[in-house]
Image (cartoon, helix red, strand yellow):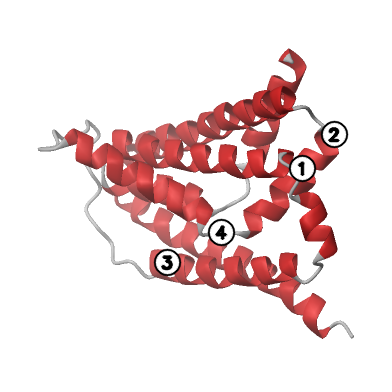
Amino acid sequence: MVSLFFIGFAAGAITGVPIGPVNVAVIDAAYRHTLRRALSVGLGGAIADFLYCALGVAGIAPLLSRNPAVPPILFGLSGVILMVYGFLTARSRPVTPAANEAPKSPNPSREVWSGLSTGLLLIILNPAAVVTWVVIVGSMIKDPTIGEGFVTALGVFFGSFTWFALVAYLTTKGKSTLGEKAQWIPRFVGMALMGYAVYLLARAARYFFAG
């Protein structure tokens, strides 16, 4: 069980490294708002990763294999969603970076909930993540029990949140070091996100136009 937890932890952290909507949202929240909001976004994304990993363990893989057109459709939907989100992020107008010390929020709980719901929705509205976790889980463990699946998904949660928390921390520190140049951070990650969206759309198109 312990080994499954650490396998899940590693998978959660590693899958968070490629540019994705939650990474973008965490960077944007840390840059324009507070570290607290950025951590909340990361927590929401980690919860969604846990849920999708649990779906993979629950045995959704046979459903996808019986319906080969479903994964490309999911990739296409994710590509469109991420393209729009990346475009809006890249063209966002420069804003004055938040102070290095987190400003006092008149409603901290509302700020936390807003960040949490943003991170959760960004993963849930990225249906290609289901396919990704089905593949990852299938390669990690074969015919897992409910207990083994839960432990693995729990490891994924902690791994994902650890990565997003690191991104939030580094962005918070980096904005004070870079000064005005930090305003290019959201633009850069937005463009990278659009590049990833093109990749997803190409995967979907390759299936439908291959023959």
Give the quarter of the image for residue 108.
top left
Of circles 1 and 2, the one toward us is 2
State the separation of the CA atoms marked 3 and 2: 43 Å
Is 210 in front, or is 170? 210
Does 211 sit left or right of 22 as displayed?
right
User: Which residue is the site of mark 1?
Assistant: 136
Q: Position of residue 208 (x, y in %)?
A: 79, 81
Type of amino acid at the residue the image marks with label 3? Ala
Local secondary structure at mark 3: helix
Residue shown at the point (84%, 39%) measured from the top left: 139
Is residue 99 something that shows in the picture? no
Nearer the observer, disc 3 or disc 4? 4
Q: Which residue is mark 4?
A: 126
Mark nearer the N terminus (4 vs 2): 4
Name the residue located 59 percent from the left edge and 70 percent from the top edge.
77
Q: Name the mark on residue 90.
A: 3
Q: At 38% across and 35% down in the image, what residue appears?
A: 39
Q: In the figure, 130 relative to 16: above or below?
A: below
Residue found at x 28% / y 49%: 32
In the rendered image, the vertical position of residue 92 relative to residue 25, given as above or below? below
Q: How many marks?
A: 4
Disc 4 residue crowd, few under 14, some 14–19, many 20+, Cα 10 Å: many
Q: Amino acid at mark 4?
A: Asn
